[in-house]
Amino acid sequence: MEKKRIALVLLAMVSAGFCGCTAGGENQKQSTAITETLQESEKAATEKEQDTDNSGIENQAETVRFEEYSGFWSCQGKTHEQILSEGGAELSCTVTKDNQFAGTFYVQQERMGRFATVCDIKGKIDQAELYFAYSDDEWGNSGTLHLQFLSDSIYVEVLDYKEAKGGSDYGINGAYELVRSKEEPDKDKEDEAYPAYDSSWTEEEIMNAINGRSQYYLASAYYPEITNYWENVREVRDITNLTEPLFETDQRYYTKEEFENEPALVIHLAKNEIYARHGYIFKDEDLFYYFMGCIWYSPTCESKDFKDSVLNEYEKANLEILAELDVY
């Protein structure tokens, strides 16, 4: 810019020298014209530089990808087990290539063990931020989660918090700085650590099993949609979704019509839970995490060792229908 200015000034001086024989009025007009030309040139150059800078910023914003933020984040990097025993907050999430976010935010109180959850958090990350309005944190409170994706952490702040009338004073409120959890679900963990649920278990054994597996269930990309299905379609809001399969495909014959109105994901899971009943270990990460979160499932059979002969007649017939309908 400075070199261009000097060149223009020199050009103006040379032009003035060549025109020195003209009348004084003409000299004044020419001098004014040169000054205006110089100012216009500087303005145009400045605007061009600004446009280039802004274009660079816009292009950079468009190319940012947040897939690497998928996974588990918690206060002080605590594991899920530590949060269950000590209290804390954790965020499990999945981010797609186009920066679409899906996740669950869980907070547990240390002293009383009370917990609050905001499920089915969805939205597109824009300028490293995401806003999500929620109407219930399981205590009737509402607000807006403001997530900021920093270089090595996720900062979660609750905006416009409204406490439920006549409800508890507990809920998701304030701000939380989350870092990578020290322990992510281990797909290679020993199978015998996860025996399948049976009706003889005590309530304490059931809850211990659910808590021990919750990190898997929350890690599955299917978690938000299937939770919504259980609660709003089947109107089941207890732990049935973790203790029982979706359908009794091993006990009776289903017709094609019985499945036709079910969501695509439910069909997909119904088909695969036929294999899951027999301990099939899924290579697909979301399927593996989903079924690992269900305490009726015990991973005992590698895919290469699985044989269809273990299926009963009900399962074979229902599998044929579900395989035809599965478009997920």
Image: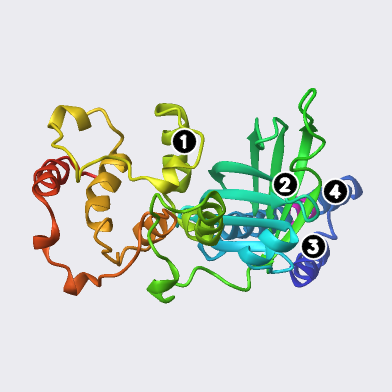
Q: Residue at x 8, y 48 (%)?
A: 313
Q: Please name the residue that numbered disc 2 is placed on.
A: 114
> Is the image coloured rainbow, by chain, by secondary structure, or in one colour?
rainbow
For the residues marked 1 and 3, what is the alpha-carbon distance in whole angstroms?
74 Å
Q: Earlier in the sequence, mark 2 or mark 3?
A: 3
Q: Earlier in the sequence, mark 1 or mark 2?
A: 2
Looking at the image, is mark 3 or mark 4 earlier in the sequence? 3
Query: Residue 32 bears which disc, if any?
Result: 4
| Labels 1 and 3 touching (C-beta < 8 A) | no
On the rendered structure, is 266 left or right of 52? Answer: left
Residue 40, relative to residue 256: is it above or below? below
Q: Is residue 296 left or right of residue 145?
A: left
Are dots 1 and 2 in contact, CB under 8 Å?
no
| Magenta-colored stretch includes residue 44 | no
> Regarding mark 3 in the picture, which secondary structure is present there?
helix
Q: Amino acid at mark 3?
A: Ala
Quadrant where the N terminus sits is bottom right
Mark 1 vs mark 4: in front = 1
Q: CA distance from mark 3 to mark 4?
A: 10 Å
Examine the structure image and report whether residue 40 is included in the region drawn in magenta: yes
Q: Which residues are magenta?
A: 39-43
Secondary structure beneath dot 4 equals helix
Label 1 packing within 10 angstroms: few (<14), some (14-19), many (20+): some
Viewer can see residue 63: no
> Which residue corresponds to mark 3?
12
